[in-house]
């Protein structure tokens, strides 16, 4: 919900296109003191149409839906559209990230995208490290305002309550803004929609100490299909660090998005022009079975986070797992195999003369000893490199059961995988 005094504005006019299907996102005012940002944005759009110049950063990102709320409304309406217009001197914007985890996650990615859009438009950006907190900042912040924030009230009413560290967090974040404003000329703070209360605290501190105008811009929150916020607290984080979420897993998260959300995500998580996104959705309407928008979304985000090699890795893993591609398995590194089959057992074996399927399964401790293990194979419960093996006496063949990269992927049943690394072939 928007802060006290906020109200919802009509959607920003969307660029005219014959395939336009979805209304542009709404922009909400964060203070009741003036007519709000809508008029300023509307004027920017009118100027862009009349003069033919490129739209300013603010109007463009509101059209994409990336910028959701701005604060404070009056000075934002009067100054931001012009300050962020093409050809103006660069501003400095920053975003702080929660330091309690060792990786950012998809929930942070929209704030990163906002920073990147500022940077691509020629502005300076800062991703905030932890800064020491000066006691003097505490005298500039009011307890009533901090306690009245919706986030603070919700935590105070919850069963878990609110720790002192959590309560002080808005003050720390406000001091970040003041420090960056003083030392780097930072005038814009970016954050998720749930950070508006903290951003307001930073605005109040900076304006009281310096008397200068600063601004806050929020980006939408990303939620799961059940409406829960994605993040470490909810236990559903999709991490940006490869050690925690592999390129394949990140790719699969986005490729599985439903039709009703994929167009919005293409606008939020990629730098694709709106005209190209419209074309992608037009083609999808004709051939929905190809999942074209989902595949493009997954490819763009994976490449953004992990680079081109990360995207190729995700594609290899996809072919190996879902299409039983022997070529993809042979091209996979040990790291990719372990990322793809995180729960798989790993074994190193020596290939002995005459070694057969039954020997392999027993040496890998993949089947029980005795007749039941033998029957597991004859019943079709064992596959090697995606090929079912029903004869326990079949001798292992290099190039068939053992791939060129010296690996065999053994599967018992539907979900139990064993990665075999062959030594001294």
Image (cartoon, helix red, strand yellow):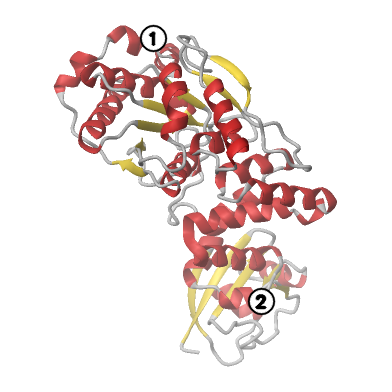
* Mark number, residue 195: none
Task: In the displayed orientation, state which residue is furthest to the top.
Answer: 144
Identify whether 424 is placed above or below 263.
below
Mark 1 / mark 2, whichever is N-terminal = 1
Residue farthest to the bottom, as pictured: 353
> Residue 421, image x and y in percent?
50, 77
Q: Where is residue 425 in the image (x, y as percent from the top left)?
A: 50, 89
Depth check: give the residue in front, 70 or 133.
70
Rounded to the nearest angstrom, the CA distance separating label 1 from label 2 is 60 Å
> Residue tagged by mark 1?
148
**227 sits left or right of 101 in the view:** right
**Percent x, y for residue 162?**
35, 18
Percent position of residue 118, x then y: 43, 43
Q: Can residue 225 be seen in this view?
A: yes
Determine the secondary structure under disc 2: helix
Residue occupying the point 30% across, 25% down? 169
**Dot 2: few (<14), some (14–19), or many (≥20) neighbours within 10 Å?**
some
**What element does badge 1 sit on?**
helix
Left/right of residue 298 with respect to residue 17 in the rendered view: left
As displayed, is residue 392 above or below residue 336? below
Q: Around disc 1, counting alpha carbons within 10 Å, would you say few (fewer than 14), some (14 to 19), or many (20 or more)?
A: few
**Residue at x 83%, y 54% (from the top left corner):** 287
Residue drawn at x 72%, y 46% as measured from the top left: 278
Q: Of circles 1 and 2, which is in front?
A: 1
Residue 326's tag is 2
Which residue occupies the extreme right position in the image? 286
Which of 378 and 38 lies nearest the eye of the viewer?
A: 38
């Amino acid at each position: 919900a928007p802060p006290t005094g906020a109200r919802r504005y009509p959607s920003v006019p969307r660029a005219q296109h014959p395939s336009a299907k979805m209304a542009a996102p709404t922009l909400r005012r964060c203070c009741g003191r003036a007519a709000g940002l809508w008029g300023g944005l509307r004027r920017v759009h009118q100027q862009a149409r009349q003069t033919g110049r490129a739209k300013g950063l603010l109007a463009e990102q509101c059209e994409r839906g990336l910028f959701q709320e701005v604060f404070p409304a009056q000075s934002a309406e009067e100054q931001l559209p012009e300050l962020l217009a093409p050809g103006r001197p660069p501003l400095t914007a920053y975003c702080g990230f929660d330091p309690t985890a060792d990786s950012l996650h998809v929930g942070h990615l929209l704030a990163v995208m906002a920073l990147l859009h500022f940077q691509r438009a020629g502005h300076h950006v800062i991703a905030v490290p932890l800064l020491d907190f000066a006691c003097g900042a505490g005298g500039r912040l009011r307890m009533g305002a901090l306690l009245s924030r919706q986030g603070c009230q919700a935590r105070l009413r919850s069963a878990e309550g609110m720790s002192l560290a959590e309560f002080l967090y808005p003050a720390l974040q406000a001091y970040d803004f003041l420090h960056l404003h003083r030392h780097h000329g930072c005038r814009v703070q970016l954050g998720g929609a749930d950070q508006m209360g903290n951003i307001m605290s930073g605005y109040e501190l900076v304006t009281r100490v310096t008397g200068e105008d600063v601004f806050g811009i929020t980006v939408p929150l990303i939620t799961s299909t059940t409406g829960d916020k994605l993040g470490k607290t909810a236990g559903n984080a999709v991490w940006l660090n490869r050690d925690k979420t592999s390129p394949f897993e990140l790719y699969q998260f986005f490729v599985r998005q439903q039709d009703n959300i994929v167009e919005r995500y293409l606008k939020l998580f990629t730098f694709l022009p709106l005209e190209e996104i419209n074309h992608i959705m037009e083609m999808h309407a004709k051939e929905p079975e190809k999942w074209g928008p989902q595949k493009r979304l997954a490819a763009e985000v994976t490449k953004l986070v992990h680079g081109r090699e990360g995207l190729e890795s995700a594609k290899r893993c996809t072919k190996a797992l879902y299409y039983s591609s022997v070529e993809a398995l042979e091209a996979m590194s040990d790291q990719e195999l372990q990322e793809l089959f995180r729960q798989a057992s790993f074994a190193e074996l020596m290939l002995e003369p005459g070694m057969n399927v039954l020997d392999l399964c027993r040496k890998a401790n993949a089947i029980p000893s005795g007749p039941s293990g033998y029957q597991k194979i004859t019943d079709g419960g064992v596959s090697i490199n995606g090929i079912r093996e029903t004869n326990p006496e079949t001798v292992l063949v290099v190039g068939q059961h053992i791939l060129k990269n010296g690996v065999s992927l053994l599967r018992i049943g539907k979900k139990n995988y064993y990665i075999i690394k062959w030594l001294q072939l």
